[in-house]
Amino acid sequence: METQPFDNSTMMELLEEEEPICIESTFLTMRVMENYLKSFEYFLLVSCFFSTFLQIYVLLKAVKYIKRGTGDECLHVFLLSMTLGDLLLTCFCYPIEQLREQEIIKPPQWINIAQHFLTWVGLSASSLSLICLNADKLMYFKFPLRYANMVTSFKGVSLALFVWFGCIVFVTLCWWLECFTCEEDCRQLMILPNKVVMYIAFTVSACIAPSLTSLGVAIYILNVVTTHRSKLSDENGNSSHALATRLRTFYFIFMTTIFTVGTLLPYRIYNIQRQLTPRETGDISCGSIIFSWTCLYLVSLNAILNPIITVTVLPQYRFRWLCEKFGGGSSTTAVYV
């Protein structure tokens, strides 16, 4: 049965063949494309290991704040959930994929299956956790006086566990329905032509919809904050510092949302378009292949750069020596909701 590629992993193998796989231009030749792709993959591989240490740091800090019971446990619970999904990607899924594509290692079939499975679970859980972060901040700015009663740590933990359970069940269902087929010891996932609709539904529900939902909520909160800033200041009394720190937390979530949309959506939308209107390899320009791979690499960059945004923007998670050097030694022990 003829299959369609699930991702761009087959492109790297075709680059080693003598026959041209794309239409070259004056500047974009096959050699330029090959060097660009290999350089970017080595960069991603090194970045994954660096990002993993930052994510472990964020996880430890999140657990610390949750145990302390500072009144903003839901923020840390959802951030822990999102970072855990990113950690799953950067410490296992992406390194296995990059090492395999570079032919540095040849994992057995069960490792490849686990890598594909956990990639989709990690991506889905991270995106849905971002929705929870936005929803938590929406509840605070929309109902500041009732927030403490409406949002509790128990509800936050329960929702985070439900997110992970739902993601695992959903991905398992897609495998059980045989939407994908494995080739070469499951090195690549191929989508069957008669399962394209299921793939599109999965991509929309697991990646596109969560990203757009987070963006919509974040923009709405931004409008609420900018419109009612004076009212929020009155409700917080004379504590301008408390309001500033809460707004800083929101801006972190807003930046993360914009970054997530910008890195996850291009490849998903492009891939859906490619599934609906497939083209022969010989009819594709080298520029189109570079664009497709760049969109795919942006998906990886999302999980890699998320902890960097966390430790540079979110006050509670900044490195202490950075605060002393660039923040004038300001304390980060205040409560941030």
Image (cartoon, rainbow, N blue to C red):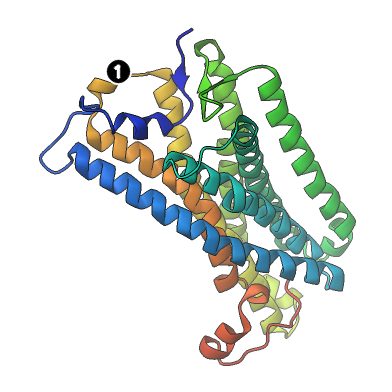
Residue drawn at 43 percent across, 40 percent down: 103
Could you tell whether 140 is left or right of 11 in the image? right
Residue 163 quadrant:
top right
Residue drawn at 71 percent across, 51 percent down: 132
Which secondary structure, mark 1?
loop
Q: Position of residue 186 (x, y in %)?
A: 56, 27
Q: Nearer the viewer, residue 198 or 141?
A: 198
Residue at the top extreme? 1
Q: Position of residue 93 (x, y in %)?
A: 58, 44
**How many numbered discs sit on the rendered protein?**
1
Q: Nearer the viewer, residue 256 or 299?
A: 299
Q: Quadrant of the C terminus?
A: bottom right
Could you tell whether 190 is left or right of 175 in the image? left
Residue drawn at 65 percent across, 73 percent down: 317
Residue 37 quadrant:
top left
Q: Position of residue 292 (x, y in %)?
A: 36, 37
Q: Looking at the image, can residue 230 be seen?
A: no
Residue 19 quadrant:
top left
Q: Which residue is mark 1?
A: 280
Look at the picture and state if 293 lies above or below 243: above
Name which residue type carries label 1: Glu
Residue drawn at 44 percent across, 30 percent down: 271
